[in-house]
Amino acid sequence: MNALATRRFLKMNGLGNQITVLDLRGSQLRVSESDARAIAAQPGARFDQLMVLHDALTPGTDAYVRIYNTDGSEAGACGNGTRCVAWAMMADPAMGDPSRTRLTLQTKAGLLPAVRESELVFTVDMGAPRLAWDEIPLAEPFHDTAHFELQIGPIDDPILHTPCAVNMGNPHAVFFVDDPYRFNLEQIGPLLENHPIFPDRANIELAAVTAPDHIVLRVWERGAGITQACGSGACAALVAAVRRELSARKAVVSLPGGDLTIEWRERDGHVLMTGPVAFEWEGVLEPDWFERAA
Ligand SMILES: N[C@H](CCC[C@H](N)C(=O)O)C(=O)O
């Protein structure tokens, strides 16, 4: 029997970004890529991102978190998932400590401090964006990642072109358009996600700046496809808009699932993301889920 079987999980969402939280602290258990895919295949546990808690590795942090996409691949950051984990570690009856209002998670991309603003609203310090081409990462050097060369569609009348590259602990390519809802993201997304310019693939954003403090955004996520919201994608879109001098350093980003407030703080260059979480249900990982997938 798979060692993960019978472990409890929480099904949550952050603005409709489907998040499953699995607490493996106090054990040596690890989730493999095929385990993640087996869990994702279950309607009751289905996720865009699976957030797996492990014992903290570094003093001053509260947990080490591994983040899996639907396809089993690992991501370095997940804004919506971080808010969900923060809620679980503070408010869940079984694993939460209600006396806490802040904590710091560690992922393979760095530290993610989170603060509870109200019962269901959290702010995460997503850190400073990395804006050099070799940190994004892109296959070719570009001297300006705010305007790097990539286009799809006819050469002289491209459908999309000249995105801005931002690494928020995971790679994003932001295209500015008039109306993100005018595009067939289902079709374009996989072409861009897997474009050879992105050796690690990329999350793809279609963004419209409708006012200096408002961005409309749709996201095609690496390893997960279209999602209702993407926290790191919202951060990437705001950073890209500021670099293009299209928006202020603080804006509301409207995603299909709802709004996030994003601020690229002047003082230290960190990006702060504020938004809600929702708890849906809890369950246990059933043994036969893994047998069928094996
Ligand atoms: N939905 C997440 C991001 C997942 C990114 C993942 N798709 C990748 O980088 O592979 C968020 O709220 O930030």
Image (cartoon, grey):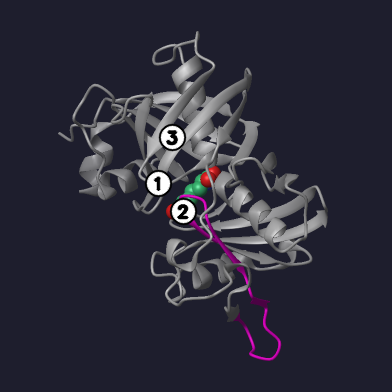
Image coords of residue 192 (percent x, y): 52, 71
Within 10 Å of the Cα at label 3, are there few (<14), some (14-19), or many (20+) other Cα atoms?
A: many
Mark 1–mark 2 Cα distance, whole angstroms, equals 8 Å
Circle 2 SS class: loop
Residue segment shown in magenta: 152-172
Sequence-first disc among 1 and 2? 1
- Amino acid at dot 2: Asn
For the residues labelled 2 and 3, the Cα–Cα distance comes to: 19 Å
Q: Residue under circle 2?
A: 170
Q: Amino acid at mark 3?
A: Thr
Horizontal side of residue 149 vs 47, given as left or right: right
Counting every numbered tag in the picture gives: 3
Of residues 165 and 282, the one drawn nearer to the viewer in this rendering: 165
Mark 2 CB in 8 Å range of ligand 1?
Answer: yes
- Say which residue label 3 marks: 20
Q: Nearer the viewer, mark 1 or mark 3?
A: 1
Picture quarter containing residue 40? top left
Classify mark 3: helix, strand or loop: strand
Spatial CA span between label 1 and label 3: 20 Å
Q: Nearer the viewer, residue 257 or 144?
A: 144
Amino acid under disc 1:
Ala
